[in-house]
Image: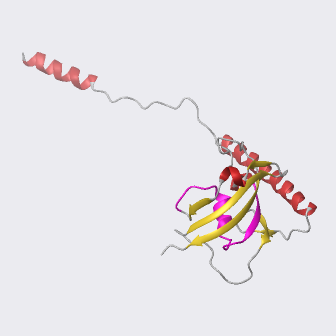
Amino acid sequence: MKFIKLLVIILLMVSCKTPEARQPERVQSGSFIKESAERNKKLNAKEHKRIESIMANHPENDYVASQNGFWYYYHNKLEKDTITPQFGDVVNFDYNIKDLSGNTIYSKAELGTTEYVMDKEEIFTGLREGLKLMKPSESVTFLFPSQKAYGYYGDQGKIGTNIPLMVDVTVNNIKQNQ
């Protein structure tokens, strides 16, 4: 009997072997990421060249290069000191969206007047950063490279993949967060 118990214990110990780790089927070297980065650099350079061409063809507009990677010019600029939107402020504005050829993608009538709570709601990066530069009753045209617009995914509607945009914006008013 002791022998059977000892045999069972030995069999249990031998059969309780830990499983070996599975090896990955394929190891990726990171070349995909390098290729993607290279592709994005080329796309970015192409878009910047196109935007620079637009600016060169319209010297009557006094374009400003933002620190955030887009360009803009004023239709109506307020010289006096007034408020610009801060975190939590409600910005009431009208805008339209065009491609760089000037073809309307979304009109002001289609989009309607928008109220946006600064940095608390979703809006594409370039427009969010652009609104922070504006004062009530100012009108600006922004030129956004695709990475500042809807990027790779587009808007799942009329704006496709990697489309740079021209956006006309008028800020109607800003309600400060108290």
Q: Is residue 154 above or below residue 169?
A: above
Colour convention: secondary structure
Q: Closest to the observer: 154 or 95? A: 95
Q: Quadrant of residue 72?
A: bottom right
Q: Residue furthest front?
A: 109
Q: Is residue 60 above or below residue 97?
A: below
Residue 87 falls left or right of residue 2 = right
Q: What's the residue at 7%, 19% (across, down)? A: 2
Q: What's the residue at 91%, 63% (across, down)? A: 58
Residue 129 in percent (x, y) is at 65, 64
Q: Closest to the observer: 109 or 33? A: 109
Residue 108 falls within the magenta-colored stretch: no
Residue 122 falls within the magenta-colored stretch: yes
Residue 44 falls left or right of residue 175 = right
- Callout count: 0
Q: Is residue 165 above or below residue 92?
A: above
Q: Quadrant of the N terminus?
A: top left
Residue 147 in percent (x, y) is at 70, 53
Q: Residue furthest left?
A: 1
Residue 68 falls left or right of residue 85 = right
Q: What's the residue at 65%, 81% (across, down)? A: 82
User: Which region of the structure is painted magenta?
Assistant: 120-145
Residue 176 in percent (x, y) is at 54, 74
Q: Quadrant of residue 156?
A: top right
Residue 15 in percent (x, y) is at 27, 22
Q: Closest to the observer: 86 or 27? A: 86
Residue 125 falls left or right of residue 4 = right
